Image (spheres, coloured by chain):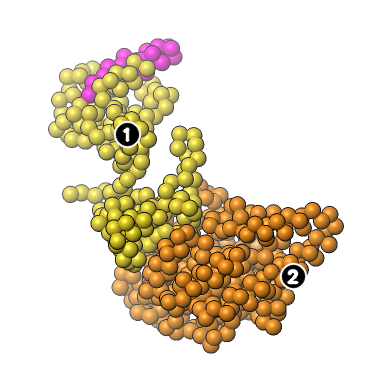
């Protein structure tokens, strides 16, 4: 990491084990209030340093993640990781958004390619993909450190002060593809990696080992499921994510518990126990900078997982 | 070669419903599947039959040319056109435009939807898009597999996170069936490995010079 501009980057640089959360503006909605509330909840936990704001996830249009990041950061006081995908914008529009992010005081951008536009709710939209995620990293890095865009045009005024995150995929087969990709992203200036959801701790550990030589601080993504349906959804429908059979079996057993409160209690206990051990294992790795907890709408387990992992 | 797909008969008929005599012009050039004399005859007969059934008969004639993408090659159609008040081209979009340019007094309508530059594994077999004519070929770096065309996102630094078991995340409809294409970057990785040139896969490629594909292009 060349420079640490954000709180997130400063903590990573200080060697602290960092937790990040995730916020998702609603599909095609002007409402952002409850997302701000969720950010406040994350902040109140005390150990969440920043939260990602998703950019048209699964190619369903939602409020601009730039505007949402600004509003949520301003109103909650929690630092945002502004997710920016290249699926919808060319390099000109991306540069505009990076400048705006700087003006809005956003200090982290997660550079993504994004799901194909055809997969969402506007399948006839023109897919842009003028740049890919590595090239977006290159663009941001140029603007921050060279003071130019990729055509050499100079940034006027103070340069943006932004740390650059990239997505990692520990589930990629063969893993060598992913390692070579991360080497490329490191070459163009990625500061940190946040991974796709991982359920199997061995996959996370193998991943961390395989990219250790690259030297990029890495956050492993976790998603404590609230139900068997959610766990099964990840296993079946989320690209590249597999859920260990034992994990699924346990959740299937919970599904059979008819008392709702009892079922929730069991699921919460299981998640806390499972992910405390998970986090304890991954944090032993030198290049593991922290854990990215994607538990939107499931605040009950976040604090206990962090508390447990910190003991 | 240029791959085309015939428009529905209804659509072709509707576009010439106001004509009395129509010349159907095939193309013996690169258009695939073949759209030559035989196909022009078949289409002309179908449209003529339909027009009679509709009670507004259209006299349909047919011919073909060596290639419709050349002003000179289509220059000797005058005799066949005779007193026709409309033409239908079985060529790609280029042919339709050339006939309209060379014979501006007669409106030429398309019989095809022009699909892509592609290949087939066997004659008359399934067809695959292979080249987007981007004007900046990098096949020497990707083991002869074009990511600009064969990666749904056209990534130069792939694969993306949507590559699962070597397949693209994007389902495509092919003749009514949903299929998933091979991930181009997964193929490039294996090809590079086979050629002992993983360095080419690992290489960071800066953004594409889109200006090279700014249409309409000229040479």
At 48% from the left and 49% from the top, the residue drawn is B170
Disc 2 crowd rating (10 Å Cα; few below 14, some 14-19, many 20+) is few
Image quadrant holding the C terminus of chain A, namely: bottom right
Q: Which residues are magenta?
A: B47-64
Q: In the rendering, what colour is chain A?
A: orange
Q: Is residue A176 above or below residue B217?
A: below
Q: Chain of mark 1?
A: B
From the viewer's perspective, tell me whether residue A174 is left or right of residue B88: right
- Residue nearer the viewer, B13 or A55: A55
Numbered tag placed on residue B122 in the rendering: 1
Q: In the rendering, what colour is chain B?
A: yellow
Q: Is residue B117 visible?
A: yes
Q: Is residue A305 above or below residue A129?
A: below
Cα–Cα span, label 1 and label 2: 59 Å
Where on the picture, by quarter, is residue A30?
Answer: bottom right
Same chain letter for marks 1 and 2: no
B219 magenta-colored: no
Position in image of residue A306 (x %, y %): 68, 77
At 38% from the left and 13% from the top, the residue drawn is B49
Position in image of residue A181 (x %, y %): 41, 66
- Residue nearer the viewer, B107 or A237: A237
Which mark is in front, 1 or 2?
A: 1
Looking at the rendered structure, the secondary structure element under dot 1 is loop
Q: Chain of mark 2?
A: A
Disc 1 crowd rating (10 Å Cα; few below 14, some 14-19, many 20+) is few
The residue tagged 2 is: A300
Position in image of residue A223 (x %, y %): 64, 65
Image quadrant holding the N terminus of chain A, namely: bottom left
At 43% from the left and 12% from the top, the residue drawn is B53
B53 magenta-colored: yes
């Amino acid at each position: 990491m060349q420079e640490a501009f954000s709180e997130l980057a400063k903590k990573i640089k200080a060697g602290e084990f960092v937790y990040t959360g995730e916020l998702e503006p609603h599909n095609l909605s002007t409402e952002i209030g409850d997302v701000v509330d969720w950010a406040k909840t994350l902040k109140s936990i005390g150990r969440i340093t920043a939260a990602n704001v998703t950019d048209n996830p699964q190619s369903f249009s939602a409020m601009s993640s730039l505007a949402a990041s600004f509003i949520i950061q301003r109103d909650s006081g929690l630092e945002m990781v502004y997710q920016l995908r290249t699926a919808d914008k060319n390099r000109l529009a991306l540069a505009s958004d990076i400048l705006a992010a700087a003006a809005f005081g956003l200090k982290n951008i997660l550079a993504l390619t994004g799901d194909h536009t055809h997969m969402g709710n506007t399948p006839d939209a023109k897919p842009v993909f003028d740049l890919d995620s590595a090239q977006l990293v290159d663009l941001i890095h140029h603007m921050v450190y060279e003071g130019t865009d990729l055509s050499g045009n100079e940034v006027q005024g103070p340069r943006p002060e932004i740390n650059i995150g990239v997505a990692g995929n520990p589930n990629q087969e063969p893993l060598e593809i992913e390692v070579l990709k991360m080497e490329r992203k490191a070459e163009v200036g990625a500061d940190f990696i946040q991974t796709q959801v991982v359920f199997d701790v061995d996959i996370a550990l193998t991943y961390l080992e395989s990219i250790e030589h690259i030297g990029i601080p890495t956050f492993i993504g976790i998603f404590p499921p609230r139900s068997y349906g959610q766990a099964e959804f990840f296993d079946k429908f989320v690209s590249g994510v597999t859920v260990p059979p034992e994990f699924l079996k346990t959740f299937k057993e919970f599904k059979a518990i008819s008392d709702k409160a009892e079922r929730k209690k069991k699921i919460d206990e299981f998640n806390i126990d499972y992910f405390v051990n998970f986090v304890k294992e991954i944090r032993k790795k030198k290049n593991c900078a922290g854990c990215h907890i994607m538990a939107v709408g499931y605040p009950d387990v976040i604090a206990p997982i962090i508390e447990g992992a910190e003991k | 070669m240029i791959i085309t797909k015939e428009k529905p008969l209804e659509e072709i008929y509707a576009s010439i419903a106001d004509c009395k005599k129509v010349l159907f012009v095939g193309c013996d050039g690169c258009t695939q599947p073949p759209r030559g004399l035989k196909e022009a005859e078949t289409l002309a007969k179908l449209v003529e039959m339909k027009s009679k059934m509709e009670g507004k008969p259209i006299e349909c004639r047919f011919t073909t040319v060596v290639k419709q993408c050349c002003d000179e090659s289509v220059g000797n159609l005058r005799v066949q056109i005779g007193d026709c008040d409309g033409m239908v081209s079985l060529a790609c979009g280029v042919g339709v435009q050339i006939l309209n340019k060379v014979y501006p007094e007669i409106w030429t309508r398309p019989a095809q939807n022009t699909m892509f530059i592609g290949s087939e594994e066997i004659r008359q077999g399934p067809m695959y898009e292979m080249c987007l004519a981007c004007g900046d070929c990098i096949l020497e770096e990707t083991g002869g597999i074009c990511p600009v065309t064969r990666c749904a996102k056209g990534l130069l630094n792939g694969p993306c996170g949507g590559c699962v078991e070597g397949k693209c995340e994007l389902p495509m409809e092919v003749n009514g069936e949903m299929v998933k294409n091979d991930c181009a970057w997964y193929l490039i990785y294996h090809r590079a490995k086979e050629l002992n040139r993983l360095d080419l896969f690992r290489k960071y490629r800066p953004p594409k010079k889109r200006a090279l594909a700014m249409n309409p292009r000229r040479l």
